[in-house]
Amino acid sequence: MAVHRSLVIFAIVAFMAPTISLAMDYVVGDDNGWKLEVNYTDWAKDKQFYVGDTLLFKYNNASHNVYKVTGDDFNSCNVPSNNSLGLFTGNDKINLAAAGKKWYICGVTGHCNQGMKLKITVLDGSAPAPPPNAASTLLAKATNFQIVLGMTLSIAAALIMV
């Protein structure tokens, strides 16, 4: 009896798995990390960031840092005077908790003006689901009646087996 219930639970989880999406972790600059001579506009242009994703800034903390700034400060490369707004560990993780535009710069003199800055747009919701597998493709083509009928028959079969 316990085995049958386990199979039913497994079937339900397997049925729902294609609709589950996971947050992404992005290493800013990929293998280059956060440093001079990396084009962060190019790095970000093909990426879609969603609420719940994280940015990881990896850098030499003796040479660089990260400040979250406003759009105006980003455009003018203005470093906030409040050091509590900066990150200095060299392995800084930022959770993208809200939708909207986000701006980050290196606060070391001259680095932002040399291109060490990142602007992204965080989208609300979650990342798109992975490409469909055969089960989710069949589900997409099924009518509501077919789905309800299939679930009803599956439950009835499970109860009969018990």
Image (cartoon, rainbow, N blue to C red):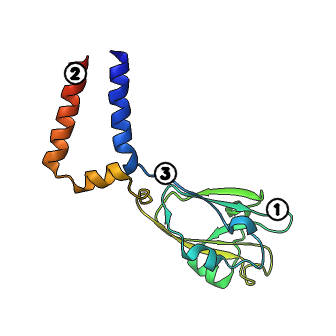
Residues 65 and 17: in front is 17
Judge whether 86 appears above or below 118 on screen: above
Label of residue 135 in the image? none
Q: Of tags 1 and 3, which is closer to the observer?
A: 3
Is residue 112 in sight in this rendering?
A: yes
Judge whether 96 appears above or below 149 on screen: below
Q: Of tags 1 and 2, which is closer to the observer?
A: 2
Numbered disc 3: secondary structure: loop
Q: Of tags 3 and 2, which is closer to the observer?
A: 2
Q: Position of residue 4 (x, y in %)?
A: 33, 21
Residue ID at (73%, 65%): 31
Is residue 33 in sight in this rendering?
A: no
Question: Residue 137 lies in what quarter of the image?
Answer: bottom left
Q: Position of residue 106 (x, y in %)?
A: 73, 72
> Which comes before the other along the chain, label 3 or label 2?
3
Label of residue 61 in the image? 1
Q: Position of residue 105 (x, y in %)?
A: 68, 73
Q: CA distance from mark 1 to mark 3?
A: 30 Å
Label of residue 159 in the image? 2
Residue picked out by circle 3: 22
Judge whether 126 appears above or below 102 on screen: above
Numbered disc 1: secondary structure: loop
Alpha-carbon neighbours of circle 3 within 10 Å: few (<14), some, or many (≥20)? few
> Which comes before the other along the chain, label 1 or label 2?
1
Q: CA distance from mark 1 to mark 2?
A: 61 Å
What amino acid does circle 3 point to?
A: Leu
What amino acid does circle 1 point to?
A: Asn
Q: Seen in the image, is 110 located left or right of residue 41?
A: right
Numbered disc 2: secondary structure: helix
Residues 116 and 161: in front is 161
Residue ID at (26%, 16%): 162
Residue ID at (82%, 63%): 60
